[in-house]
Amino acid sequence: MTLTDWIVLAVTLLAIIGYGLWKSGSNKNTDQFLVGSRSLPWYTVGLSVMATQASAITFLSAPGQAYSDGMRFVQFYFGLPLAMIVLCITFVPIFHRLKVYTAYEYLEQRFDLKTRVLTSFLFLVQRGLSTGITIYAPSIILSTILHIDTTYTTLAIGGLVIFYTVYGGTKAVSYTQMLQMSIIFLGMFFAGVMVVKLLPENVGFVDALKLSGKLGRMNVIDWKFDPDNSYNVWSGLIGGFFLQLSYFGTDQSQVGRYLTGSSVAQSRLGLIMNGLIKIPMQFLILLIGVLVFAFYQFNKPPVFFNSYEVDQIKNSAYAPQYKAIEQKHTQVFEQRKAAAQNLVSAFESDDAAKVSAAKTELKKADTQALQLRKQAVALMKENNTKADTNDTNYVFLSFVTRYLPHGLIGLLIAIVFLASMGSTASALNSLASTSVVDIYKRVINPAASDRNYLNASRLATVIWGVASIVMALYASKLGNLLEAVNQLGSYLYGTILGVFVVAFYLKHIKGPAVFWAAIITEIIICVMGYYQVVAYLWLNAIGCIAVVVIASLFHMFNKPLVPLK
C-alpha cells in the first residue's frame, strides 16, 4: 500500500466512526444503549440489518469461495425472502407490542424462566464463537499488508471494536452501518468494473463468464436433491429458510437491529428491504470472484495466495523444493493462458468442435495447476503442521493489493474494515444485552438501578469482546470463514428456532415440554453434525422440526418431567 491508500483508509474509517458517534449522542440509560430509544427509520433499520449480516467475511471469503467453488453458494440465500415474510407477519409485531429488549424476554412470558435462560445461553455460545471469526477476517488484511502474524492484528482490531461499541451503543452502530453499506456498495461496484477492464482487450465480460462456466464456475442453480450437498436449490429453500428465519427472528444481533425501528411498519419495511436486496448483492459479490478467476487465466496467479505462509516456506529448508514448484507453475500457466486464448477465439468462431477441443485443453492445464498447488500445500504441512493451508480468504485480497489502482486499494480495504466493525459491534451489543437483560437483570441482580444495568452492559461488552478475540486467535483453523460461521450457526439455530415456533404457534404446549425437547434436540444435532450425517444446512430444519415434534410428544403423552428450579 502507498501513502495514498493509507490516507484513504484512515480518512474513511475516522469519518465514519466520527459520524456514528456524533449521531448517537450520549447514552444515559439502557434503553438508549441497547435499542437506541426505538426511534430509527426503515432505511436505517434495513441497512443496519444488512450490515450486521454482511461482515468482512462476506467481502473477503465470498469472492474466494466463487474462485474455488463457483457461484453455487448463492443458493444458500434462496430461503431469505420467505423468512422475511414470516418475520414481518409473526415476530416483529409481537416483539414491538411487548416492548422487549431481547427476543428471549418473550420466552419467559410464554413458558418459564429456565426456558428463557437456556435459549439465551445457546445464543450466547453461538454468537460468541462466530463473533471471533468476524474479528479474524479483517486481521488477515493487516497481516498480509504488514507481513506480520495475524495474532497481533487480531488483538489490535478487536481492541478497536470493543472501544467503539462500549462508547457508542446500538444507535452509533446503526447510524455507522447505514453509511458503511453505502460505501461498500460503491466500492464493490468499482472493484467489479476494474476486474473487467483488466482483462485482455479481446476478452469481454461475456467471454469471461463463458470461460469460467466451461471450468465449472457458473454453477448457479443445482436442482438435484442431495442431502449431502450443502448448496442446491432444495437445501437453500428449505435448510436456508430455517437458518435465515432463526438468524433474523431469534438471534439477538439481528433482532436488536429491527427493535430500533420507530414502529412495526418501519421494522417491517427494513426487513423487506433486506429480503429484496440481499440475494442480488450476494450474487454480484460472488460474480466478482468468478471474474477474478477468469482474470487469472490470463495473468499468472501465485501458487498459494496466503503470502505469509509462502514467506514461511521460502525461508525454510524446503525453499528449493518450493522454488521448483513455482518454476513448473510458470510453465503450466503459460500453457493454460494459451488454452484460454484458444477458447475465447473458439467462442468468436461459434464452432462447437473448436470450443470442445479448447475446453479440453484448458481443463488439462487447469488440472496440472491444481496438482502443483497440492504439492505446495503438502510441502507447507511438512514444514509446519500448524500452517494455514486454506487460502480462499486471501484470493480477493491478493488481487486487490496487486492489481487495483492506488486509492481504490485503500477504499476496498476500508470496506472490509467497515464491514467487520459493523457486524462485530452489532454482535457485541447483542451479547451484552442478552447477558444483562436475560441473565444478570433477571437471575443475578433483579433489583438494581438503571445506571447499574447500563454499566453492566458496558462491562459485558468488554468481556464478550475479549472472549471473541480469544476465539479469533483460533479462527485460522476453520478453513473458509464464510462457511465456518454458517456451520457454527447451524448447530444451534434450529433448536432456538424450534423453541420460538412452539411459543408462537403451539399455545397448548408448556415450558417443561419445550425445555427438555430443546436439550434432547441439541444433543441429537451435535451428534449428527459431528458424524456429518447430512450437509450442515439441513441441521437447521432438522433441529427446528425435532423440537416441535419432541415437545408435542411430551405434551401428548403427558410424561412426568423432572422440574428444574
Image (cartoon, helix red, strand yellow):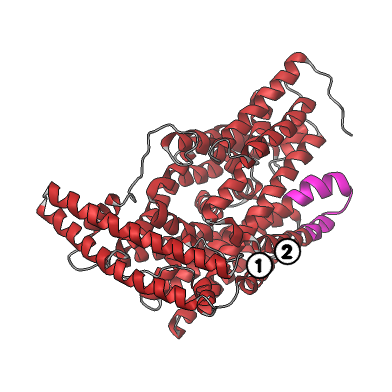
Residue name at image x 35 percent, y 66 percent: 190
Disc 1 is placed on an element classified as helix
Residue pointed to by mark 2: 466
Neighbourhood count class around disc 1 (C-alpha, 10 Å): few under 14, some 14–19, many 20 upward: many
Of residues 87 and 321, which is closer to you in this image? Answer: 321
In which quadrant of the rendered image does the N terminus lie?
Answer: bottom left
Of residues 17 and 79, which is closer to you in this image? Answer: 79
Residue 336 as seen in the image, left or right of residue 482: left
Q: Are marks 2 and 1 in contact (CB under 8 Å)?
A: yes
**Which residues, given as a range, are shown in magenta?**
434-457
The picture places residue 395, in percent across and down from the top left corner, at: 43, 64
The picture places residue 9, in percent across and down from the top left corner, at: 49, 75
Disc 2 is placed on an element classified as helix
As drawn, which residue projects farthest toward the top? 557
Amino acid identity at mark 1: Gly
Amino acid identity at mark 2: Val
Q: Which mark is residue 109?
A: none
Neighbourhood count class around disc 2 (C-alpha, 10 Å): few under 14, some 14–19, many 20 upward: some
- Quarter occupied by residue 96: top right
Residue name at image x 76 percent, y 61 percent: 463
Whether 503 is among the magenta residues is no
Residue 377 as seen in the image, left or right of residue 126: left
Of residues 93 and 252, which is closer to you in this image? Answer: 252
C-alpha gap between disc 2 and disc 1: 8 Å
Residue pointed to by mark 1: 158
Q: Determine whether 193 is above or below 355 in the image.
A: below
Of residues 311 and 221, which is closer to you in this image? Answer: 311
Is residue 37 something one can see in this rendering?
no
